[in-house]
Amino acid sequence: MKARLIFAVLFMLLLPVLVSADFEAVKDYRFLPCSQTNIASFYANVVKEQKAVKDELAKKYADAPKKVAEHPATLAYELIVSSAADLRSRSGKSEPLSSLSQAFARVQRLHYSVKADLDPYSDPSLLVLAVKCGTNYLFGPLKLKTIKPKLDKPIGIRQAMLEAKNLFKPGQKDPIGPEKLALMTPIEISRLEPAPDHAAIRPVKPGNHYQKFEKDL
């Protein structure tokens, strides 16, 4: 207990220095508020990035143009650029920004995740590791305990309303409604399946199926 108290004092003294540590996956990434200027700027930026990514992949797979065309980064940037182009066009037609803000935030989140995957941080600095270890050491005992779920009891209608829609028992054609889900246990629900033609499990040719997958959710 004494060691923990001493460490806490030192931690608080160093806090002004430690708070500047960066824990973001993409350094200096700025999520832009929705405006006509920001949408146009975002579009111009992702078009440049798309070209850079294609050029890099073309060098890496010089003898396999099909691999470049079907690479996840290529498909992701095609979706990002097309979405940004659509937003730029709609904002240029004086469409209210309130109707564009959600889509603009969504495409920025997708852009962020793609950049994090393509250009991840190098190993974290010793300072960042020290902050993480120190936080775990000091506040670990205060972490809340999770409640063990009751796997052998029905989940009830409230929880059933939160479950995924269009779940099927193997071999059945009709989905399980919330009323029936409410009478099932978590183990029974875990054995349910999505529709046989769901994009997540249906064999499809390589390509951009993100919008279809999102629609099926």
Image (cartoon, rainbow, N blue to C red):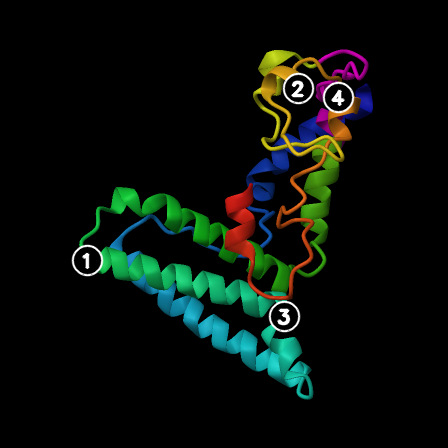
Left or right: where 43 falls relative to 149: left
- Which residue is the site of mark 4? 186
Q: Which is closer to the viewer, label 3 or label 2?
A: 2
* Boundaries of the magenta span: 137-154
In the rendered view, tell whether residue 96 sits above or below residue 134: below
In the rendered view, tell whether residue 6 sits above or below residue 80: above
Alpha-carbon span between mark 2 and mark 1: 46 Å
Q: Amino acid at mark 4?
A: Pro
Residue 135, given in percent of the width and then of the height, sits at: 70, 33
Q: Amino acid at mark 3?
A: His
Q: Amino acid at mark 2?
A: Leu
Q: Residues within 10 Å of mark 4 (few under 14, many from 20)?
A: some
**Quarter where residue 181 is shown:** top right
Alpha-carbon span between mark 4 and mark 1: 49 Å
Q: Residues within 10 Å of mark 3 (few under 14, many from 20)?
A: some
- Which residue is the site of mark 2? 181
Say which residue appears at 55% left-offset and 44% top-offset.
216
Majority secondary structure of the magenta segment? loop
**In what element is the residue under mark 3?**
loop
